[in-house]
Image (cartoon, rainbow, N blue to C red):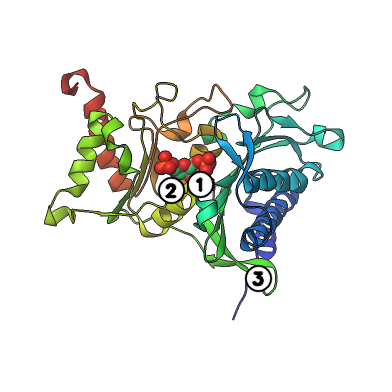
Amino acid sequence: MKRVTLPRYILERQKEHSFATGEFSILLSQIALAGKIIADELVHAGLADVLGRTGAVNVQGEEVQKLDELANEVFISALQFSGLVCTLVSEEMAEATNFPGASAEGRYVVLVDPLDGSSNIDNNGPVGSIFSIQRRVNLKSPPSDEDILQKGSRLLAAGYILYGPSTVLVYSTGNGVQGFTLDRRIGEFVLSHPEIKVPKRGKTYSVNCGRYAYWHPWTQKYFDYVNAVDAPTKRPYSLRYIGALVADMHRTLLDGGIFLYPADTANPKRPTGKLRLLYEAFPMAYLMEQAGGRAITGTERILDIQPTELHQRVPLILGSPEDVTVAESFAKAGASPACATT
Ligand code: AHM
Ligand code: MG
């Protein structure tokens, strides 16, 4: 059997990347290394003393799990000595971290959610890591917000690692989406899902419908729509929701359908939903578009949003193009004063 490892794949396609020769290979192999280390820690988590909470609360106001902290440390160690990354942005760190020494000259900003879906950790559910890479805007001055707060449409690369029954790394550098599965026998990611394309339409929707009471009227109407019986459009859709964005994204990417984490009214402090723009919504939107899908807030393309804050949140709706377009028509009708129902 022909086995194409991740390092071989990157080398073979290096000329297509918008990175300077060799730099992307180093960056991606360091990210893949972080993924392998985290995957290994997760496999043994129930045996080592790494389950549960640290007692700390992060910048998001969420309790930090020991594995959140560990995964964050793994990404820092994997990236800070590459000499390529000037700044790391992480869900687990209140501020962006500028790496010292030779790295201060680095030409890239890396953004990560080191362990996404961490509420699944203690019950042995799937979790993931999300990463993306931006090019530093100005090499002559110290790294600043200008380098970090760039639109998703300017991303050089994005991807995720899903720690499920197998560990899968999916990434794009703007030339389609490739998926690799970790072969533990040789310790390498091996190409298993070349040129991933999302189906034009799916049969499932994915949303935390326990929040129905807090949703805006258009979201409730869309939910009622996907649950209604209509043979020509193959409704009702089935519900699939894992509660870990990486796992819900991976299924949606492969099988089609729609994922939503919409804005709701539950918490006035976060009227734009739960998911974070820079290190959750942007990379997933980038991958979904690269696979032929769409990603919107409801009324706006995610990748066109100009970020204003490091940990800003955003409503996220992504998936098969036809499914997202239907949801968009509900959102646009709901946003129009003529159609407002409250
Ligand atoms: P996390 O990054 O702190 O783990 O939170 C993000 C997660 C996503 O993975 C997932 O889509 C969402 O939170 C689930 O939230 P909820 O439990 O409200 O459905
Ligand atoms: Mg997350």
Does any portion of residue 72 appear in the rendered image? yes
Image marks 1 and 2: residues in contact by CB distance under 8 Å? yes
Q: Which residue is mark 1?
A: 119
Viewer-nearest of discs 2 and 3: 2
Q: Residue furthest right?
A: 101
- Residue 154 percent across, percent down from the top left: 56, 34
- Identified by mark 3, the residue type is Arg
How far apart marks 1 and 2 lie (CA) works out to 8 Å
The residue lying at 27 percent from left, 39 percent from top is 327
Instruction: Please determine whether, in this image, residue 225 is positioned above or below residue 251.
Output: above
Tell me: is circle 2 under 8 Å from ligand 1: yes
* Left or right: 41 as drawn, with respect to 124: right
Nearer to us: label 1 or label 2:
1
Horizontal relation, residue 274 to residue 256: left or right: right
Q: Residue furthest top?
A: 337
Rendered view: 187 above or below 309: below
The mark nearer the N terminus, 2 or 3, is 3
Q: Hey, what amino acid is under mark 2?
A: Gly
Q: Looking at the rendering, which quadrant does residue 279 occupy?
A: top right
Q: Residues within 10 Å of mark 1 (few under 14, many from 20)?
A: some
- What residue is shown with label 2? 243
* Numbered disc 3: secondary structure: loop
Q: Nearer the viewer, mark 1 or mark 3?
A: 1
Along the line of sight, which residue is nearer the eye, 289 or 222? 222
- The residue identified by callout 3 is 184
Residue found at x 23% / y 22%: 336
